[in-house]
Amino acid sequence: MTRKTKESGKSESAWPALITTHRRLVDRMEAELAGAGLPELTWYDVLWTLERAPDGGLRLSELARDIVLSRRNIPRLVDRLELAGLIRRERSDEDRRGYFAVITPKGLAMRRRMWPVYSRAIATHFDGHLTAAEHAALRAVFARVLIALRAQELESS
């Protein structure tokens, strides 16, 4: 039986289930990383994003746009990663006020140390609960939503 919303009479959105599941998965993955003596998942997110970027670096505004997890407190997060020697800031040649965050060799090594713990957590707490058909369906659904969001972003810029 599907619950109906009071406002519209339509079936309830999957949104609450999505964000609740996301939060719990992130909490579980954070606990596994901490248990292995590794930094928090947001560090992995930044290091992975920078590793994939051209020349291993992005403007701080681009980094904030491209990371998957929380975009809050990017300057503080970048400060902590820089203090740990995992990234460095470089001044932009085009705009002397702008900075790039660039992954260091130590940052690459840390991201690679984190991946086995993170990938096991993904397999255990997410992938292992879904069939191949469910994985394919979720990829299709999320791809459709992302395409629509990107189109809206292009229209508004």
Image (cartoon, grey):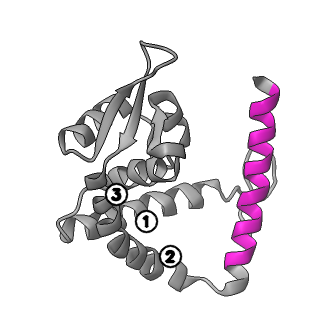
- Hey, what amino acid is under mark 2? Phe
Q: Earlier in the sequence, mark 3 or mark 2?
A: 3
- Hey, what amino acid is under mark 1? Leu
In the picture, measured across the screen, residue 60 lies left or right of residue 73, that is: right
Can you tell which quarter of the image residue 90 is in? top left
Classed neighbour count for the residue bearing mark 1: other residues with Cα under 10 Å, few (<14), some (14–19), many (≥20): some
Q: Is residue 55 above or below residue 75?
A: below
Was residue 7 drawn as part of the magenta stretch in this picture? no
| Mark identifier at residue 12 | none
The kind of secondary structure element at disc 3 is helix
> Dot 3 corresponds to which residue?
108
Q: Position of residue 80 (x, y in %)?
A: 23, 39
- The answer to which of 36 and 11 lies nearer the viewer is 36
> Dot 2 corresponds to which residue?
126
Between marks 2 and 1, how big is the CA–CA gap?
Answer: 8 Å
Q: Earlier in the sequence, mark 2 or mark 1?
A: 1
Quadrant where the image shows the C terminus: top right
* Residue 19 seen in this snapshot: yes
Question: Are discs 2 and 1 less than 8 Å apart at CB?
Answer: yes
Give the foreground label among 3 and 2. Answer: 3
Q: Position of residue 120 (x, y in %)?
A: 39, 79
Quadrant where the image shows the N terminus: bottom right
Was residue 148 drawn as part of the magenta stretch in this picture? yes
Q: Position of residue 127 (x, y in %)?
A: 54, 80
Can you tell which quarter of the image residue 97 is in? top left
